[in-house]
Image: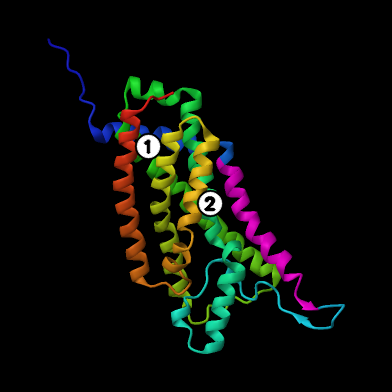
Amino acid sequence: MAAKFEHNTFGKRLKSMLKVDFRRMFTMRLFYIIAGSCLVAPILILVMTTMFGGADPETGETVEPMFTNVWQIVSSISGGEASTEAAADAAAMSMDITMMCNMNMLYFAIAVLVCLFVSEDFKSGYSKNLFTVRAKKSDYVISKTAVCFVGSAIMILVFFIGSMLGGAIAGLSFDTGIAGTSGVVMCMLSKIFLTAVFIPIYLVMSVSAKQRTWLSMIVSLGAGMIMFMMIPMMTPLNSGVMNVILCLAGGAVFSIGLGAVSNLILKKTSLV
């Protein structure tokens, strides 16, 4: 009787790769350090900045705290939705002061996660052994993109939980204003889907630099800074269905397009 060999299909290869990568992600100490930082950071920011509010002991003037509403640390209101000139000025001030201390800064933490997660494969020789034994480079790129997307979504949700805790401790208002509850939900979905735009960029940098973690991180953070201004524009606190659709579509386009670039880089360059 002739021996039968099971055909190693794309689905089976990808399932195996995802299983390995998810296990590596969730057993990696670094991931929990970053996730823990995402929980603690908004609590510290909201509590510490609220302490600076009140009357200035030297001048007697009232000093407004950096954050007056808990939702400011999640995102800012789109200026186009401001109903009055004062509201528009407040939105602009919010963009100037709080933009670098809100959830948008997580896109830099995501760069760190992707670069360290990928570079470890090349440093340990895992990737070379992986491609030699069973996996195709396209499987590797798809798996890394999917796993890092899940990791990034967890980071954003943990930051949101920390924001709620920090707001409660600091005694800040939870009034959603013109954004409404639906706007907050759409904002969170938009931010999660927008990570699919940034992750493929960071992945390209990581597979290009390979074991040179410092190089991949510098270039990735630089790319993140260049694209940073699109984050508050695409994911305002008063987001709607269109914001979610645009972020989802952008993530799909970048994941497919830059995923192909990462695959090409792996095929054309040395794995060491």
Mark nearer the N terminus (2 vs 1) = 1
Between 9 and 270, the residue placed more toward the observer is 270
Between 13 and 76, the residue placed more toward the observer is 76
Few, some or many residues within 10 Å of mark 2 (<14, 14–19, 20+): some
2 and 1 marks in contact (CB < 8 Å): no
Residue drawn 76% across the image and 70% down it: 51
The residue segment tinted magenta is 31-55
Decide: is 210 above or below 199: above
Q: What residue type is labelled 2?
A: Phe
Q: Is residue 139 left or right of residue 95?
A: left
Mark 1, secondary structure of its residue? helix
Q: Is residue 80 left or right of residue 95?
A: left
Residue drawn 55% across the image and 36% down it: 214
Residue with the mark numbered 1: 18
Distance, label 2 to label 1, CA atoms, is 24 Å
**Quarter of the image containing the C terminus?**
top left
Q: Position of residue 70 (x, y in %)?
A: 60, 71
Q: Where is residue 204 in the image (x, y as percent from the top left)?
A: 40, 41
Decide: is 220 above or below 64: above
Q: Where is residue 179 in the image (x, y as percent from the top left)?
A: 47, 78
Residue drawn 61% across the image and 55% down it: 39
Q: Is residue 47 magenta?
A: yes
The tag on residue 108 is 2
Few, some or many residues within 10 Å of mark 1 (<14, 14–19, 20+): some
Decide: is 265 above or below 181: above
From the image, give the main secondary structure of the stretch colored magenta: helix
